[in-house]
Image: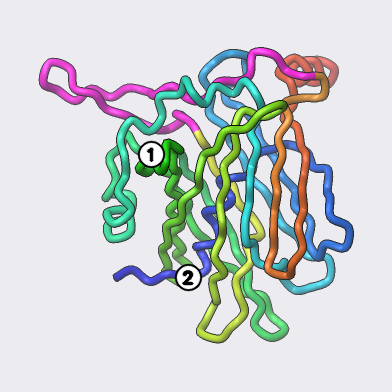
Amino acid sequence: MRRTGWAAALAAALCVLATALTPAGAGASQTVHLYASFTPDRPGVSTTITFGFTVSSHDEPAPSPLLGVNLHLPAGIGLGHTTLGTAVCEPTNLYEQGPEGCPPNSRLGYGSALAEVPYGPEVVQEHATIDAYRGATVEEHAVILFFAEGWRPVFAHVIFPGLLLEDNGLFSGSIDTQVPLVPSLPGGPNVSVVQFQSTFGPKNLNYFRETNGELVPYKPRGVTVPPVCPRGGYPFAGEFSFEDGTHQTVHATAPCPAAKAALHTRRR
């Protein structure tokens, strides 16, 4: 059986996208910074989202461990038109065999993460890789299986699901993930995610379909860059909860392609 560890907390980070931050929650003991980009970033095209976040502590050696994240994605992002995840990955296979246990057509993205845990006056860091797969539908809602694999200094694996829910107004949907507390050692402090980055989309992914009895590789269609960018950029929002009882709601934007091009022109 594979050993679990702090890496359980890392999967929640696939629920965070943005490029700028408006912090909320006065008195919170940590601050979240978020970023995101589209590749390519032309309106209306299939795209891969690269996203990430950092969490910093105000006055403690490490931030409070994450308990949950609910990410709201901008309207018009085309969640219903993507062909990502045409196959389903079984959690048992993923847990026992790692990425090799899932069909290629179930993979949704990949990335890396960093966690910290205080040991006396020192803070120990743990690195991990992140892979995202399509899970079986639950009550008509799509499920994303996040696989966190730690390598140093502790070898650890864990899976955890995010539920894709409908949204409205400025947002097209949300990914709601609950993060279990993970002790560093029996009776020791729980680990804290401090950095995360990943992709969601077809970049560097190869899918396969059968043509004339042969498996032919192809690129799936990703989510869509919204056709119209609101003034100020594409809106994202994230709701974070932490072990210390604090909550933060952050509102952030990814820049409009035209604004990005104009900024590049002014710098030349």
Q: Amino acid at mark 1?
A: Arg
Q: Earlier in the sequence, mark 1 or mark 2?
A: 2
Mark 1, residues whose alpha carbon is within 10 Å: few (<14), some, or many (≥20)? many
Q: Amino acid at mark 2?
A: Gly
Residue sitting at 69 percent across and 86 percent down? 120
Q: Quadrant of residue 3?
A: bottom left
Mark 2, residues whose alpha carbon is within 10 Å: few (<14), some, or many (≥20)? many
Residue 236 horizontal side relative to residue 40, left or right? right
What label sits on residue 5 in the rendered view? 2
Which residue appears farthest toward the front when viewing the image?
139
Q: Quadrant of the N terminus?
A: bottom left
Residue sitting at 30 percent across and 35 percent down? 87
Give the residue pinned by disc 1: 107
Q: Main secondary structure of the magenta part?
A: loop
Q: Quadrant of residue 214?
A: top left
Magenta-span inclusion, residue 197: no
